[in-house]
């Protein structure tokens, strides 16, 4: 499903975010990205979402070269992606249900369909009973689970999660990871960057980056 072919990303003449990175990820895999801050994990995820483009090499998703797609094709690409970041970017002036509905409404779904699918997504992350709550009334872990519900409401083929458990206590981190594993169990490809050693120790596959280079892909 995903292939990086000799991918480099250079922001200036002295600094590489990624250098000559190559690997493949099959459809339906759950893969963790590991490495210290500045290793290139976030840059790699942003390339898959067409938020960054490689300086050289190819980034392929389902055979499509993401680094060369037209700007007009990016919204269509992102409809098949679920994006989860450390900062949840929830809208604090509306309910969590309304937050989760938003990706559907902007793509033309009816209000009724959007509400139904958003409630189903919240149920999957264990927050159905909090649908009418405001984001600021939720804990950090609950807010992160709302961001997961928002990411999967479009039924994406691929979930990209950048440090989704950062700054959460262990119980909250485990609930977030359980939610991601639940989507993986029904065939969704998941790529998760993390510093969490406990999480990485339990992972079936980890891609290690250091200073923009691939160390190994166990």
Image: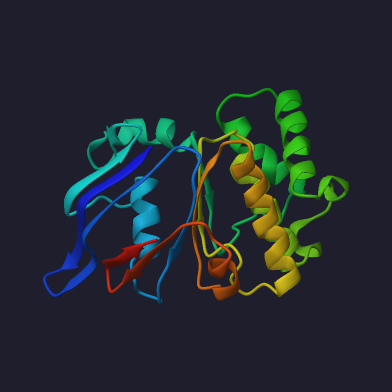
Q: Is residue 170 left or right of residue 18?
A: right
Residue at image position (20%, 58%) is 8
Applied colour scheme? rainbow
Q: Is residue 112 above or below residue 205?
A: above
Residue at image position (14%, 75%) is 14
Q: Residue lying furthest left in this view?
A: 13
Please identify the quarter of the rendering in which residue 64 is found.
top left
Q: Which quadrant: the C terminus? A: bottom left
Residue at image position (17%, 49%) is 57
Q: Residue lying furthest right in this view?
A: 129
User: In front: 109, or 23?
Assistant: 23
x, y percentage for residue 97?
A: 76, 43
Q: Is residue 153 above or below residue 9?
A: above
Please identify the quarter of the rendering in which residue 59 is found.
top left
x, y percentage for residue 213?
A: 25, 67
User: In front: 191, or 167?
Assistant: 191
x, y percentage for residue 44?
A: 35, 57
Q: Which quadrant: the N terminus? A: top left
x, y percentage for residue 35?
A: 40, 72
Residue at image position (40%, 76%) is 37
């Amino acid at each position: 499903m995903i292939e990086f072919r000799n991918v480099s990303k250079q922001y200036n003449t002295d600094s590489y975010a990624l250098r000559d990175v190559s690997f493949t990820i099959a459809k339906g895999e759950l893969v963790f990205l590991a490495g210290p801050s500045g290793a290139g994990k976030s840059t790699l995820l942003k390339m898959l979402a067409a938020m960054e483009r490689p300086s050289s090499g190819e980034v392929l998703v389902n055979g499509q070269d993401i680094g060369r797609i037209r700007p007009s094709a990016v919204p269509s690409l992102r409809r098949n992606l679920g994006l989860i970041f450390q900062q949840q970017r929830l809208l604090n002036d509306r309910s969590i249900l309304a937050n989760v509905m938003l990706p559907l409404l902007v793509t033309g779904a009816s209000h009724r369909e959007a509400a139904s699918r958003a409630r189903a997504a919240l149920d999957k992350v264990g927050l159905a009973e909090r649908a009418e709550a405001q984001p600021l009334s939720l804990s950090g872990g609950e807010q992160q689970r709302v961001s997961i519900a928002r990411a999967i409401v479009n039924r994406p083929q691929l979930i990209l999660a950048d440090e989704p458990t950062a700054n959460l206590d262990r119980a909250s981190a485990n609930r977030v990871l359980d939610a991601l594993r639940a989507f993986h169990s029904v065939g969704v490809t998941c790529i998760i960057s993390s510093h969490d050693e406990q999480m990485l120790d339990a992972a079936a596959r980890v891609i290690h980056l250091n200073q923009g280079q691939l160390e190994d892909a166990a």
